[in-house]
Amino acid sequence: MKKQILVVISLLMFLVSCGESDLPEDYVSVNNKILAIRITEPEVMPGDTVRMKLLVSGKDMDQASDIPVTWTVGSETEGLYHQEEVPYHQEFQIEVPDDAASGEPGVDIPVVATIMMDMKLLSSLKRFRITRNPEGMNPQISGIVAQWKSGNDSRNSTIMSGETITVDSTVANIALTVNTVALPEGANDVLIYNWYYTTSNSSDGMLEVNDDKDRIEEILGTGSMAAEFRQSVLLSLYGENGEGSYQKGTYNIYIVVRDNASQSNSRFEDRLGTDFYHFTLEAI
């Protein structure tokens, strides 16, 4: 049985290569897709408790879902192997043996998460390193700042993960900016941002990324930049370029922040830090 499991793990690794390959190329998420795996830290010590969490997007995806996620950690060749099924909304955790990586400067441990959604098996691969001298750290999201104009009034609100923000038809565009906790120098040389959102799960509504420089600066200030791959993104509630009708609806929005590289075939970069948030935009 163990040999069969190892074959499955090897096949999954081949399919997803060495990165989180289920990442959608498009930032609009309609069907369920794995956006990220977050691990306690990309580098841990023997004896540490390692916690893992999966982020799946989709207009009907409930982040409180109890759909089972199968976590497969390591293999017999790494001296650490564990497989367990836990509900999606829960973190999975595993204790690293005290004698792990004994005599080695560091050992990279593969983690495969699989989940069945609408009769489709989704899977993603990530790694963490066991080392006596951990250095890699996750970025840490501290909150999302939402800014918009309602008529001539400028407004803002801070959103935490899992919360809902509500706007009405007086709002043409809403800017979202992700803030992170300052980490020690060298911990995060470059942060990579990926915003995703769904089509409405309560209507035919559709948000659009607004890249109009004037509209961006109107809300975020002169010289500001915003895009689905930047720290800030500007979303239009009135269709492309603000030229459509009001897009009433309920939208799930996700932000994934990575350290140094969004996608890579490098094993080293594959275990760099990750954090994510999800929240809901209610356009009434």
Image: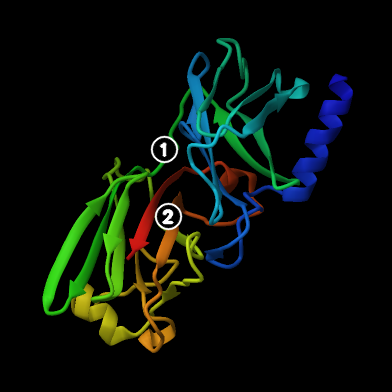
Residue at figure coordinates x 15%, y 66% from the top left: 155
Instruction: Please identify, in this view, whether the residue under mark 1 or under mark 2 is nearer the observer.
Output: 2
Image side of residue 178 versus residue 112, left or right: left
Q: Residue furthest top?
A: 98
Please tell me the numbered disc located at residue 255. 2
Please tell me the numbered disc located at residue 137. 1
In terms of depth relative to the viewer, which is nearer, 59 or 203?
203
Label 1 sits on what residue type? Met
Callout 1 environment at 10 Å: few (<14), some (14 to 19), or many (20+)?
Answer: many
Please tell me the numbered disc located at residue 75. none
Image side of residue 273 versus residue 60, left or right: left
Callout 2 environment at 10 Å: few (<14), some (14 to 19), or many (20+)?
Answer: many
Residue 233 is drawn in which quadrant?
Answer: bottom left
Image side of residue 231 versus residue 71, left or right: left
Q: Rounded to the nearest whole Å, what is the CA distance between mark 1 and mark 2?
A: 18 Å
Q: Position of residue 258 (x, y in %)?
A: 46, 51
Q: What element does badge 1 sit on?
A: loop
User: Which callout, 1 or 2, points at the residue further toward the start of the chain?
Assistant: 1
Residue 266 showing in the rendered view: yes
Label 2 sits on what residue type? Ile
Q: What element does badge 2 sit on?
A: strand
